[in-house]
Amino acid sequence: MKRAGFTMIELIFVIVILGILAAVAIPRLAATRNDASGSKLATELATCVNDAGADYLMNENFTLSVGASPACQAAVSPVGPGGVVCYTVQAATPAANQITVTSSGSGAPVCVEAEAISDVSLSTNAPGRIHTF
């Protein structure tokens, strides 16, 4: 007569294999989430700088973009675990034609990823640059 079911050793092998797969997959998922959040933050910063430039060109001051633009609010809002702020965006005065984007230098993985994306492209939204319109 044939018995149905699994032996204890087969169940242990399955549990060990699932444990190994989980040990590999979980860190990759966390890294992928940081990459996605960093990309989104870099995009929001670029949009913020573009909004600020368009606002200045239309109104000859920063009436909306630096403080109230949704992209600027997203670029300077806390992100990641612990609510780290990665950037600050400031205009010298509303009538000045310059804004300054600075990095917080927090070293959070999301901020590091966003700064790497901004710096690699050498785009005008890179942190530490003064943007003149």
Image (spheres, grey):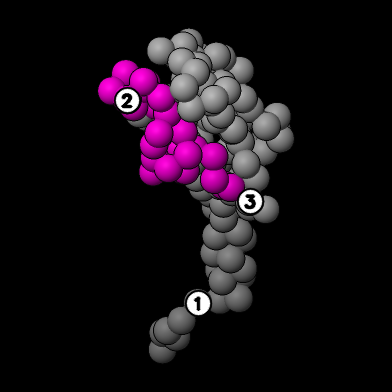
Residue 64: give x, y in percent of width and height. Answer: 39, 36
Q: Looking at the image, is 71 positioned above or below residue 127?
A: below
The residue carrying pointer 1 sits among few (fewer than 14), some (14 to 19) or many (20 or more) residues within 10 Å by Cα, namely few
Label 2 sits on residue: 59
The residue carrying pointer 3 sits among few (fewer than 14), some (14 to 19) or many (20 or more) residues within 10 Å by Cα, namely few
Q: Is residue 46 visible?
A: no
Determine whether label 2 and label 3 are within 8 Å by CB: no
Label 3 sits on residue: 83
- Closer to the chain start, of discs 2 and 3, is 2
Label 1 sits on residue: 6
The count of marks equals 3
Q: Looking at the image, is 54 positioned above or below residue 131?
A: below
| Magenta part of the chain | 52-79
Furthest-left residue in this view: 58
Identify which amino acid the numbered label 1 is placed on.
Phe
Label 2 sits on a secondary structure element that is helix
Magenta-colored stretch includes residue 38? no
- Viewer-side label of 2, 1: 2
Residue 31: give x, y in percent of width and height. Answer: 55, 41
Determine whether label 2 and label 1 are within 8 Å by CB: no
The residue carrying pointer 2 sits among few (fewer than 14), some (14 to 19) or many (20 or more) residues within 10 Å by Cα, namely few
Identify which amino acid the numbered label 3 is placed on.
Gly
Residue 26: give x, y in percent of width and height. Answer: 57, 51
Using the image as rendered, state which of residue 90 and residue 49 is in the foreground. Answer: 90
- Closer to the chain start, of discs 3 and 1, is 1
